[in-house]
Image: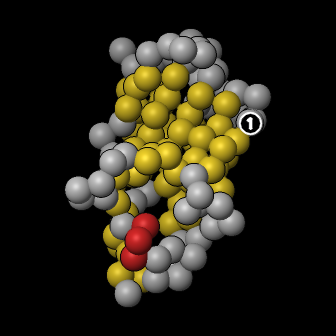
Amino acid sequence: QVQVVESGGGSVQSGGSLRLSCAVSGFSSRIYFMGWYRQAPGDLRELVASITNANRRNYGESAKGRFTISRGGPVNTAYLQMDNLNPEDTAVYYCKATAISGGTAYWGQGTQVTVSS
């Protein structure tokens, strides 16, 4: 079975940084799509950043210029480097993985990020 596990969340002050990791197991080949999403209480889940196996990257508007997504080679792991955090970044961050284009999406349980002022 496929497992998606996030780590690296925590509590930081405004202007601080965090690095999130997403490890995916259960696939026999490199993941086609990996992405980071976030959801704050009462809000919709939104895209933060994503990356494909061709290293094509997309960023949500609030992440541009502050966050960077990357992935491992033979290991199906995605990283999200978050710099210059502010309280509006407070949310649960989720990792999503898809093996092929249009295939089943697998989600992790999320990791909490809290930014204080």
Percent from the top left, x then y, of residue 54?
A: 76, 28
Crowding around mark 1 (Cα neighbors within 10 Å: few <14, some 14 to 19, many 20+) is few
Q: Residue at the far bottom: name it.
A: 117
User: Which amino acid type is marked by label 1?
Assistant: Arg
Percent from the top left, x then y, of residue 28?
A: 56, 12
- Above or below: residue 30 compared with residue 6: above
Q: Is residue 15 left or right of residue 87?
A: right
Looking at this view, is 84 or 8 the one in front? 84
Identify the residue shown where x is 30% and y is 54%: 43
Position of the N terminus, as image quadrant, is top left
| Residue 78 quadrant | top right
Whether residue 74 can be seen here: yes
How many discs appear? 1
Position of the C terminus, as image quadrant, is bottom left
Whether residue 12 can be seen here: no
- Tag 1 secondary structure: loop
- Above or below: residue 95 compared with residue 79: above
Q: Residue at the far left: name it.
A: 42
Q: Is residue 89 left or right of residue 92?
A: right
Identify the residue shown where x is 65% and y is 61%: 64
- Above or below: residue 56 compared with residue 115: above
Percent from the top left, x then y, of residue 48?
A: 52, 51
Looking at this view, is 62 or 77 the one in front? 62
Identify the residue shown where x is 58% and y is 47%: 49
Percent from the top left, x then y, of residue 72?
A: 66, 38
| Residue 40 quadrant | bottom left
Identify the residue shown where x is 40% and y is 51%: 38
By what rule are the colours in the image chosen? Answer: secondary structure
Mark 1, residue position:
56
